[in-house]
Image (cartoon, rainbow, N blue to C red):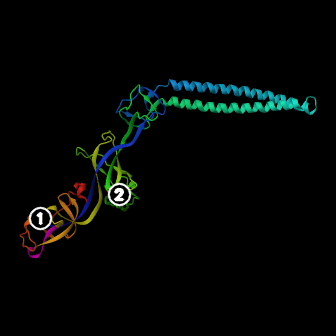
Amino acid sequence: MTAAASESVPIIGNWVATTDGYVNAQIQPQVSGYLIRQDYTEGSEVHKNQVLFEIDPRPFQATLDQAQGQLDQAKGQLGQAQAEVQLAEINVQRDTPLAQAHAIAQSTLDNETKTLQSNQASVASAQAAIASAQAQVESAQLNLGFTKVRSLIDGVAGQAALQVGNLVSTSSVLTTVSQLNPIKAYFYISEQEYLALAARARSSGHADLLDTGASIPLKLTLSNNQVFPESGRIVFVDRSVSSQTGSIRLAAAFPNRNNLLRPGQFGRISAQTQVLQNAVVIPQRAVSELQGMNQVYIVGSGNVAHVHTVQLGPQIGQDIVITKGVDAGEVLVTEGNDKVKDGARVAPQQETTATASNAGQAPRGENQ
């Protein structure tokens, strides 16, 4: 027999997690052409703006040269139009007083004025042509620069999806670069666990789970059952709870300085969701099930055992929390329950009081 204990019991949630890059950048070219060079080693670390691939630049260089020629031609036309304007202005200024003195025909001045206006329009047209040609030059320069396909972020570059000699377009994915430090781990928790975590965050003065930082540390256990040495923090909470599963998706970020963790790994994330104060804890073996009801035998005065129906809470290692049906200090039968009858006298043999010392090892399936 043992007495029910009153304990402060930390409830540990345990969830299956999948790792993913903190940022995953698909590397796609911004121009079409033939790949002529791969400039990185697959699986290596790369840096932002590092050249990963090169596309044949010759067609783009030719386009740039053509655009530069058109720009030079437009500049020459502008210079000619400006010279003609200056000449027309001289003629108009010279002949205006002569026409007023009737020394020349008014029609001569009118024709010179029209010539000036026409030349001014030619200047405006040439200036517009220069602006258009300059834009074409800049576009051609950009496209020529785009023949060097660069990494968008710092990270680890994956395997090349296309090889040298392949014709690529703007829709082609050449490789993917993932930021691995920190790395994300996605996992799903139940609505009840989410509410418990949110309540814990608010009780510690935080607005929501994203504001908790390191105040709710997350532990990651890898597939080989080794615990990852770094603690994680919540960095993403999905906008809604799934109506099909009743769960919500979260993401945790873990420091990953040596790139040990890679996208696609599986593990288990655990965290303390709440603390049950003054919880009644008994050994699991004291509970028996009969026709869907959980029962215990409580030993009363005269060592008489009486059956009590109980409601179970979370499992804590070899013990379990009782939410209803047993009070702290009551003595329970822990051995031979199947032989005990309600109202029978028992011979007590006291055991060590149940404790919640191994509460942190409770698997998720037992925290329901």
Q: Position of residue 16 (x, y in %)?
A: 28, 50
Magenta part of the protein: which range?
A: 295-304
Asked if residue 188 lies left or right of residue 65, the reply is left
| Neighbourhood count class around disc 2 (C-alpha, 10 Å): few under 14, some 14–19, many 20 upward | few
Residue 155 occupies quadrant: top left
Outermost residue to the bottom = 301
Q: Position of residue 256 (x, y in %)?
A: 33, 42
Residue 224 occupies quadrant: top left
Residue 334 in the image: above or below residue 82: below
In the picture of the structure, the residue carrying the numbered disc 2 is: 243
In the image, what residue type sits under mark 2?
Ser
In the image, what residue type sits under mark 1?
Thr
Q: Position of residue 48 (x, y in %)?
A: 44, 36
Q: Position of residue 72 (x, y in %)?
A: 64, 25
Q: CA distance from mark 1 to mark 2?
A: 41 Å
Pointer 1 or 2: first along the chain: 2
Q: Tag on residue 334?
A: 1
